[in-house]
Amino acid sequence: MKRIPLSRGTALCTALLIWLLAGAGIAQARELPDFTWMVERYGPAVVNISTTQKVSGSPHLPPELNLPDLPEDSPLRDFLRRFFGEDGEGGDEGTFNSKSLGSGFVISRDGYLLTNYHVIRDADEIIVRLSDRRELIAELIGSDERSDLALLKVDADDLPVVDVGSSEDLKVGEWVLAIGSPFGFDHSVTAGIVSAKGRSLPNENYVPFIQTDVAINPGNSGGPLFNLDGEVVGINSQIYSRTGGFMGLSFAIPIDMAMQVVDQLKTQGYVSRGWLGVLIQNVTRDLAESFGMDQPRGALVAQVMPDSPAAKAGIQVGDVIVEFDGHVVDKSSELPPLVGATKVGNSVPVKLIRAGKQRNLKIEIGELPEEESIAAGGGKPEPSPIEDSRFGLTVADLSDEQREALGVEQGGVMVESVKPGAARAAGIRQGDLILRLNNQDVESAEQFRELIKSLPGGKSAALLVQRDGSPLFLALRVPAG
């Protein structure tokens, strides 16, 4: 490679540039946040929580734990014999104490504390250890499994407390700090940034989680997440991990939602949530096309519960909810937290898209039932198949026994087989119950075949199926020609 000599002036400019860049790097390093004052001021308000519970039976070694043969005089062999029985196969039947560890923080000087529900689940005794090494027995004021929150009370006065901030004002990219007891190491401090807001996790429909890259491990659960102003903006709750340890994905419950839960637990001992009474899913690009939408957005209604607020307001299967009480709904996961946070009995405006046209409804929100049940079942259809070679799909009518098992009073056809083709590409499976096609109810196998014949080529059609008891919209791309 040819070298180009530098003049004295060029060399001087280069040296000056390097000096400026080095100075900028030092200045930038000096601008990194200093968390020491936060730890000194608010660390004492963070507590360690341990629980005990009586477990029936006898403890056993995990089956995946393979230990080598041990000498008769080995202390470890004596330990296994004493606590797990000979060769670790289990000791005497009875009860023994099971302990768990977690974190929490004080929210009032008279002894109210906040932690995760899963930290104190099924506990016979809850022990709170303060930073001054005092250990106090805590009373469970109330808990809410759906939000994974629990409110505790200890008999103490003038306790150090945290300052509660607002998770609504939190921004992605903002620095945050966590204090907790990972693996029982009290008052461990870790820091990172907010990775995302409003995250939806499996089986967690009513919590719009804050995602961070703060190092969170078992034992951090229930501990506070601080912003740079020293205010609590979240409660560390879950991690995404394949190993059980931190892998860069941590999730915290927004403090705004948590304090609403606290208020209800204090006043009424339980949490009531708003209820719409629909099952929803995301709108894909192909589904958006089939519903006459210009882009995928909103929450697609796959099922409307009988006698629910949605049913009474006139919401139908196939409607796409795009706005709820003034809040834009871009993804289906955004709707449940909005509905859940709405006061029971309030009437709220809802905007939806039906058959490509926008409609406005007013819905009076009901109270979320303790348990929502959906008819589920299965069965093999009686031999009356109708095959469509264009889609590679074979369907059959339902017998009375199958309708009773599946909870379907009328209509619908069962998928007997799916060959390579448009149906398989759409995700249709053997055993699916097809309920609607292109916004029309499917009444029989023969009528379904006629509906398929009428579909325009090269377009997507919305197909509603029931799978394992739950409704699901699929986009069926019709072959051209």
Image: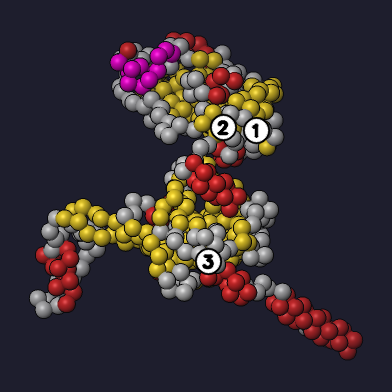
Q: Earlier in the sequence, mark 3 or mark 2?
A: 3
User: Residue 397: x, y in percent?
Assistant: 38, 14
Q: Nearer the viewer, mark 3 or mark 2?
A: 3
Q: What is the spatial separation of the Cα atoms under label 1 and label 2, in whole angstroms?
A: 15 Å
Report crowding for label 2: few under 14, some 14 to 19, many 20 or more residues within 10 A (C-alpha): some
Q: Earlier in the sequence, mark 1 or mark 2?
A: 1
Q: Earlier in the sequence, mark 1 or mark 3?
A: 3
Quarter of the rendering containing residue 341: top right
Q: Nearer the viewer, mark 1 or mark 2?
A: 2
SS state under label 1: strand
Report crowding for label 3: few under 14, some 14 to 19, many 20 or more residues within 10 A (C-alpha): some
Seen at 61% across and 58% down, the residue is 164
For residue 210: magenta? no
Seen at 24% across and 63% down, the residue is 65
Seen at 46% across and 25% down, the residue is 465
Would you name the residue on which mark 1 appears?
A: 324
Q: Is residue 28 left or right of residue 227?
A: right
Q: Which mark is residue 344?
A: 2
Q: Which mark is residue 159?
A: 3
